[in-house]
Amino acid sequence: MKHIREKISAIVFVHNEEMYISSLIDSINNQTCKVDQIIICDDFSTDNTLGIIQNKKNNLSKNINIKIINNKKKGKVYAYEEALKSVDTELFFVCAGDDVLKRDYVKSMMSFINKYKIDFAYSNHVWVDSNLNFIKYTEKNLFYTVNDLIYSNFAGGMIFGRSYIIKQYIPFPKGLTFEDWYVALFLSDKFGKCYINNNKNYLYRRHDGADTFISTRKDKVNLVKRDVLFFQLLVNINFYKDMFKNRITFYNGKIKKISFIKFIKILSLRNITSMEKIKFIIIKLTRYY
């Protein structure tokens, strides 16, 4: 009996990725295991991202189908959902517009889900800089349960799987501002585990424009605050409500700790007056206590 090859879609969401989108598209097109289409949802880019994608679409039309979708409502979550709705192949995978896939990425993920007889898995990744120079790589567990993922998104966002699972987690709940942790939690709860393929075929680019790039204390505080809002959303939809109430308390403590470190550093400065220090103490005590 002749084996029927399952078709594959790549899901990409982009916002001002003119510097990187071309290399991502080329890396998808050059996979040793053929990818049939790339579905790209643009989240209101203001640079030449769409122009570059259109040129790639024209030049690669004989090799791969590139479908361009304009996001209907600004935000990464909406872009992701719009792209997912357009998947019409048996398999799909998700990648960011500024990352790069090594040639055996799809082949490795296909082999992995077939080996463990599972319908989806996540890829580990190698951290690289904007020029693809190595930063770090951390080995992960073979799988994580929902109880593991409550404490941190160990799975990440690079999911590869059978397309039927998409309907298990969209539409996204109103108010969701980032999707990867939500999807990992929901799928691990639904299927028992999230498996991780510890390949080194996904290059995760870290640069100033990345949405989770942290360079200052303010960036760190904003990221923690974002997570607190995420936990509150999960509480509101009764998803492990008590567990996430505890996470909210813990994360609010992290915010206070970060602010307290800044507080101590300011008090140690010699170029501010004692009166300015007193005013600063009063403001902090009023805000946090």
Image (spheres, helix red, strand yellow):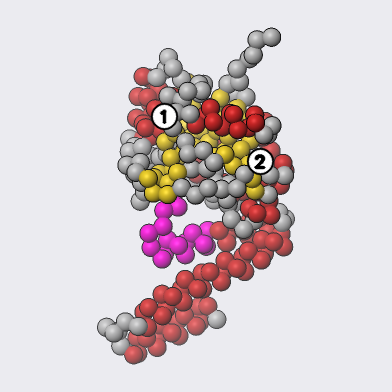
Does the rendering let one see residue 106?
Answer: yes
What is the span of residues highlighted in magenta in the rendered image?
211-226
The local crowd at label 1, few if under 14, some if 14 to 19, many if 20 or more residues have their Cα within 10 Å, is some
* Main secondary structure of the magenta stretch: helix
Residue 27 got which mark?
A: 1
* Mark 2: secondary structure: loop
Q: Measured from the top left, where is residue 37 in percent x and y?
A: 50, 23
Give the amino acid type for the residue marked by disc 1 in the picture: Ser
Tell which of 51 and 183 is nearer to you: 183
Give the amino acid type for the residue marked by disc 2 in the picture: Tyr
Residue 169 got which mark?
A: 2
Q: Measured from the top left, where is residue 240 in percent x and y?
A: 72, 56
Q: Quadrant of the N terminus?
A: top right
Q: Please, is residue 48 above or below residue 127 in the view?
A: above
Tell which of 126 and 161 is nearer to you: 126
| Structural distance between the alpha carbons of marks 2 and 1 | 28 Å
Quadrant position of residue 271: bottom left
Does the rendering let one see residue 83?
Answer: no
Q: Quadrant of the C terminus?
A: bottom right
